[in-house]
Amino acid sequence: MSRLVIAGEVLESRLFLGTGGLPRPDLVRPVLEAARPALVTVSMRRASGSAPAGLLGILRDIGARVLPNTAGCLSAGEALHTARLAREALGTSWVKLEVVRDERTLLPDAVELLDAAATLVTEGFTVLPYAPADPVLACRLVDVGCAAVMPLGSPIGSGLGVLDPHAIEAVVAAVDVPVVLDAGIGTASDAALAMELGCAAVLAASAVTRAEDPVGMARALRLAVEAGWIARRSGRIPRRAEARSASPLTGRVS
Amino acid sequence: MRITLNGADVECDAPTITLLLGDVPIGCAVAVNHEVVPRSVHHTHPVNDGDTVEVVAAVAGG
């Protein structure tokens, strides 16, 4: 499996993982060991007194990079502040940029997103924006310097999978940066489909953390991402309306 | 003096960020009045009456 490169950095896996929502903190390590993600997202929240060293230590142990997100931000201004705090806290200039319009749909606010992305790029951030599956907006995000684009397959946490495969394919065709399917993954086949559509990686969180067996689902997603990637490069057969036998039609016993 | 610390109104007499919060661990960051204060200047950055201080930490997220 050839390796993924984002902003000049080689990533060892095409699966990115969020760990929010796990029922027990002791599942973080086995889930990450099963998924072997290249990037693991974290959120910035008011400190409650407990040190975050546990999670960061596990990431160090398994060799995954931390990818802070700006989840929960409702404006470009909030997202900028959160990204700057994350850079100070974690010593990384990479950010998964999320700016949503409301907390009911959690859908990206394209106007605020583009505004925030442009500013963060000028401040030296490597910006991976969570975006609508829109090839025009994807081009705009790349124009302002985003290192990847992360279109949603379906709403965050919905598990509805890739609702509009053609839109994802259109985003892949429109930009020359890696496209990471973000949001909506429900199970392994969703991740495989995203990769078959041409995505360079998949980001999943709830699909794993809220699965009945998070460790099993973590492994399933890792395998699905790899299978989808290989399938994409192997050239699937054209779809056809009629049957076509794979067995010889000559020499049949009559 | 009174400051707002993570949304709570608190009384304090610490003249600097370090004296207010101690050593802030890796994975955490501090902002005063909506400006990030780099770790390297916590020991000199003043805390003034009426300041809004935020301390954030990286937590598991999606």
Image (tube, helix red, strand yellow):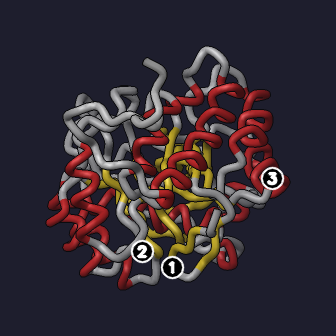
Q: Do we see residue A174 in this rendering? A: yes
Which amino acid lies under the numbered mark 1 shown in the image of this protein?
Answer: Ala
Numbered circle sitting on residue A147:
2
Residue A27: image location, x then y, percent: 75, 28
Report the Cα–Cα distance between label 1 and label 3. Answer: 22 Å
- Distance, label 2 to label 1, CA atoms, is 6 Å
Q: How many marks?
A: 3
Q: Amino acid at mark 2?
A: Ala
Is B50 situated above or below A107? below
Q: Are marks 2 and 1 in contact (CB under 8 Å)?
A: yes
The residue beneath circle 1 is: A7
Protein chain holding label 3: A
Q: Decide which of A203, A61 is in the foreground and name it.
A: A203
Label 3, secondary structure: give it: helix
Are discs 2 and 3 located on one and the same chain? Answer: yes
Judge whether A184 appears above or below A203 on screen: above
Residue named by callout 3? A62
Q: Residue at x 43, y 57 (%)?
A: A235
Do the dots labelled 2 and 1 sit on one chain? yes
Rate crowding at label 2 as few (under 14), some (14 to 19) or many (20 or more) other CA atoms within 10 Å.
many
Please name the residue shown 50% across and 57% down the image.
A234
